[in-house]
Amino acid sequence: MIKEILHKLFLPCSEATLLMEKRNAQSISAKENRMLSMHLMICKWCRMYKQKLEILDKVFKKTFSEKETEINEFEIQDFKNKMIDKLNF
Amino acid sequence: MKRALYVLSNKEDAQDVVQEVFLAAYSGYDSFEGKSNPLTWLMAILNRKVADFYRKKYKSEPNIRLDHFFDETGSWKNNDVLNDWNVSGDGDELLDSADFNKTLEECIQELPARWKILVKMYYIEEKKAPEVSQELNISTTNLWKILQRSRMQLRECLEFNWFSRS
């Protein structure tokens, strides 16, 4: 009950988690930032989610900037052939 | 090519896009001033071509629903978000584990293609939200929503498939 009232007064969690994305990208306004901070003070669910989001952010930063997918030699050759056809050499 | 395939997760699409990159590079070679590494130059063309591809493919407004996670008042439906992950440091340990990487990859593959490309582009472009939303031709509001929704789903997937098991 208290949770519901607080969420109506401040922010619902569905909005708070959206603001976390904006804060994470440093695109949050001062007002939104205040609202999010207040929400985090009263909501342990979102506090926990925020911690996990920070871990995910670090993991993604590493994994998305480095990862590539393996391709076998045959596929590369196939691709080169198609490319040559297209260029009409 | 590997990078294209990783971002697009679809062989035919990746081949088409990489062909376009080489054709663009071939016709635009004169404008390449040799100031940067050729690979960097090709990667910049690749990012542009992936963005073109995305814009062409996904013209309609995205449909993003959060009712799987939140009830009608906007509160969390499940308490599994409260589980402790017991991660120390900055996540390095996690990424050192081949099993974790595999689980992470599987969870990423479960995202709809449209979100998957966007999230990858967002990180490849170092989280420059205005640039990414402009390139992919979506509003920043929708960019936040897709990021939020994708991350919610990845969090839940890892919760069930990794953290609650280890």
Image (cartoon, grey):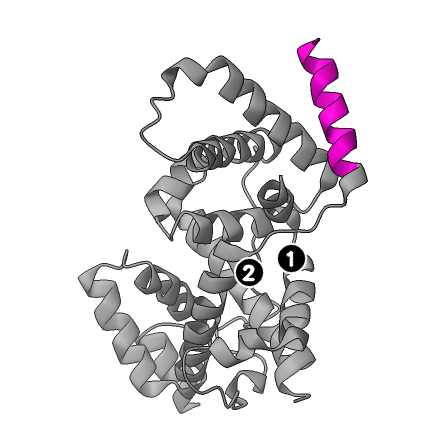
**Distance of label 2 from label 1 (alpha carbons):** 7 Å
Foreground pick, B9 / B41: B41
Residue found 31% across the figure and 29% down from its top: B35
Callout 2 amino acid = Ser
- From the viewer's perspective, is B102 left or right of B146? right
Q: Residues within 10 Å of mark 1 (few under 14, many from 20)?
A: some
Q: Secondary structure at mark 1?
A: loop
- From the viewer's perspective, is B72 left or right of A1? right
Magenta part of the protein: which range? A75-89
Foreground pick, A7 / B50: B50
Q: Is residue B30 above or below residue B162?
A: above
Q: Which residue is mark 1?
A: B111
Is the C-beta separation of discs 2 and 1 under 8 Å?
A: yes
The answer to which quarter of the image holds residue B59 is top right
Residue B111 point in image, percent of width and height: 64, 57
Main structural element of the magenta stretch: helix, strand or loop? helix
Mark closer to the chain start, 2 or 1: 1
Residue found 36% across the figure and 40% down from its top: B131
Q: Which residue is mark 2?
A: B150
Residue B102 point in image, percent of width and height: 68, 69
Residue found 50% across the figure and 13% down from its top: B27
Foreground pick, B31 / A61: B31
Q: Is residue B30 above or below residue A12?
A: above
Q: Secondary structure at mark 2?
A: helix
The subunit carrying tag 2 is B
Q: In the rendered view of the protein, which quadrant contains the C terminus of chain A?
A: top right
